[in-house]
């Protein structure tokens, strides 16, 4: 069973209720409640950051359309066995980082740590192999890993992912890399892709044996943790940050020497396609990735930066996974490839490049409804609906009676016009339209208010109003 050290513990039992129904409730001593905090490793995406998220999500959606991907949304909760079989039992993600729990019915469920396994499950479950192949699917949403929180590493984080199922051609791998590179470039983030090939499972087994033999010969230098890794998942040693491993790695066997002809040719073709489009890449013979499903091409994007931390934290990654469909119970020999981008890290790059304004800006409106007295307020409330239905950005401060306070808000929201309605206007069936810059005003039939504002917006200038 994965996740022995995982985040979930049994809930503490509720205290037994001992008082009888007739026991009087204890007198409450007024104590102010402690404010609750967000869960460690998780965070709020606040209004001031939403513009960056919107920009990033729009890029994800636009590129999905441009490259012919269809949207898919899978549940956040899946059977734990999907990730054990899909991502791999001996990976950190499954072994240490899954949020798993057992239901009353005895099922083991988990919050998804990534999207690929779920998309492949869905492809199989819904018979998508009967559609024209390849099937291109994209998604975005939260993923959960009980990792050690640190800069750029959260326990709930967001990915945009793109999966191409049912095609073995290296051009698919290359186009996924091009998509990711364009995604980041389009947001003003220059990156280099680090790329490697893990070959077929057979090449990988032979390479693993060579790697184990090499690190065994250096066993005396390895930490206890690394000795365990060597037994369970020796490839993981290659992305260890431990200085001893970094030094030993320089002499370690490289997978490229263990690739069969087909894998080598596939890899060369991917590189040729990247050259053709001019996507900068760097060969990284030790790039292995933290998920077990990869075969052949693997890659990760890194920002071009002198900053150590930036250049070490991947903005996204992916690769080919030709065996996953079959290992999750689908038709044998269904090749596939995919990638996902880490949106939290991308948004934080965007914020660094273009910091948010210090003062809190209220959303902009074109017109603001200001009211005086109860009758004016009721009429304004109804008029607000007319503006909203007409699609004109409109603001209000219905809970405020003071006209000066209302005008200040109108100014803060950048309204070009204020519509003032008091008792007199209600009785006359009119409104006052005030030009906030010029300070001029005009009286307009209430039924024509929306039309008048529309006209002004269309002209971009004041037009003579139909006075009554
Ligand atoms: P991954 O490399 O585990 O791959 O995650 C992709 C990206 O998600 C990372 O490069 C990183 O930017 C972001 N990320 C991962 N963990 C965290 C975290 N704890 N906090 C913040 N960001 C994080 C996958 O998940 C694969 N499913 C990619 C794929 C799709 N391969 C084939 N298809």
Image: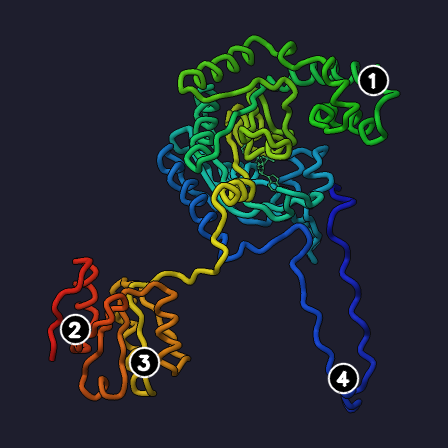
Q: Give the numbered dot on residue 448.
A: 2
Dot 2: what SS? Answer: helix
Quadrant where the C terminus sits is: bottom left
Q: Give the numbered dot on residue 371.
A: 3
Q: Which residue is mark 1?
A: 216
Dot 3 or dot 4: first in sequence order is: 4
Cα separation between marks 3 and 4 = 44 Å
Of discs 3 and 4, which sits in the foreground?
A: 3
Dot 3: what SS? Answer: strand
Where is residue 407 shown, x and y percent of the image? 35, 74
Where is residue 326 shown, x and y percent of the image? 57, 29
Residue placed most toward the observer, 75 or 315? 315
Residue at 50% from the left image edge and 52% from the top image edge: 49
Dot 1 or dot 4: first in sequence order is: 4
Dot 1: what SS? Answer: helix
* CB contact under 8 Å: marks 1 and 3: no
Query: Relative to 185, does residue 451 appear above or below in the rendering?
Result: below
Quadrant where the N terminus sits is: top right
Quadrant assignment for ligand 1: top right
65 sits to left or right of 184: left
* CB contact under 8 Å: marks 1 and 4: no
384 sits to left or right of 346: left
Dot 4: what SS? Answer: loop
Dot 1 or dot 3: first in sequence order is: 1
Residue placed most toward the observer, 173 or 237? 237
Q: Which residue is mark 4?
A: 29
Residue placed most toward the observer, 417 or 75? 417
Query: Relative to 150, does residue 386 appear above or below in the rendering?
Result: below
Residue at 80% from the left image edge and 78% from the top image edge: 17
Task: Report crowding for label 1: few under 14, some 14 to 19, many 20 or more residues within 10 A (C-alpha).
Answer: some
Quick check: can you spot residue 293? yes
């Amino acid at each position: 069973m994965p996740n022995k050290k995982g985040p979930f513990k049994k809930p503490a039992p509720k205290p037994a209720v001992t008082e009888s129904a007739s026991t009087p409730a204890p007198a409450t001593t007024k104590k102010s409640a402690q404010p609750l905090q967000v869960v460690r490793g998780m965070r709020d995406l606040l209004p001031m950051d939403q513009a960056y998220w919107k920009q990033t999500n729009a890029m994800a959606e636009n590129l999905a359309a441009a490259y012919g991907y269809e949207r898919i949304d899978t549940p956040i909760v899946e059977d734990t066995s999907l990730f054990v079989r899909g991502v791999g039992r001996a990976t950190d993600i499954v072994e240490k980082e899954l949020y798993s729990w057992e239901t009353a019915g005895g099922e083991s469920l988990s919050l998804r740590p990534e999207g690929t396994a779920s998309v492949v499950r869905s492809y199989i479950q819904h018979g998508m192999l009967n559609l024209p192949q390849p099937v291109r699917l994209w998604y975005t949403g939260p993923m959960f890993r009980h990792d050690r929180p640190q800069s750029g590493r959260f326990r709930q984080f967001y990915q945009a992912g793109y999966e191409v199922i049912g095609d073995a051609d290296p051009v698919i791998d290359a186009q996924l890399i091009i998509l990711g590179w364009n995604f980041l470039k389009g947001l003003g983030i220059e990156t280099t892709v680090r790329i490697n090939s893990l070959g077929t499972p057979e090449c990988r087994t032979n390479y693993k044996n060579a790697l184990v033999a090499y690190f065994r010969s250096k066993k005396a230098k390895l930490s206890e943790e690394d000795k365990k890794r060597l037994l369970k998942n020796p490839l993981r040693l290659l992305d260890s940050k431990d200085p001893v491993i970094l030094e030993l790695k320089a002499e370690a066997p490289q997978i490229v020497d263990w690739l069969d002809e087909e894998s080598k040719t596939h890899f060369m073709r991917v590189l040729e396609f990247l050259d053709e489009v001019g996507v900068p890449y760097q060969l990284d013979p030790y790039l292995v990735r933290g998920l077990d499903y990869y075969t052949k091409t693997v890659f990760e994007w890194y920002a071009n930066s002198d900053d150590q931390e930036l250049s070490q934290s991947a903005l996204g990654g992916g690769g080919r996974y030709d065996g996953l469909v079959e290992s999750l119970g689908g038709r044998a020999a269904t090749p596939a490839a995919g990638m996902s981008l880490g949106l939290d890290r991308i948004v934080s790059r965007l914020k660094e490049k273009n910091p948010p304004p210090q003062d809190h800006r209220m959303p902009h409106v074109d017109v603001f409804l200001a009211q005086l007295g109860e009758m004016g307020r009721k009429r304004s409330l109804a008029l607000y609906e007319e503006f909203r239905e007409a699609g004109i950005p409109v603001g209000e401060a219905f809970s405020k009676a003071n006209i000066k306070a209302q005008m200040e808000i109108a100014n803060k929201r950048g309204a070009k016009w204020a519509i003032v309605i008091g008792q007199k206007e209600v009785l006359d069936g009119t409104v006052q339209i005030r030009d906030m810059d010029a300070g001029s005003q005009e009286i307009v039939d209430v039924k024509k208010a929306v039309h008048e504002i529309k006209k002004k917006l269309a002209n971009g200038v004041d037009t003579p109003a139909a006075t009554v």
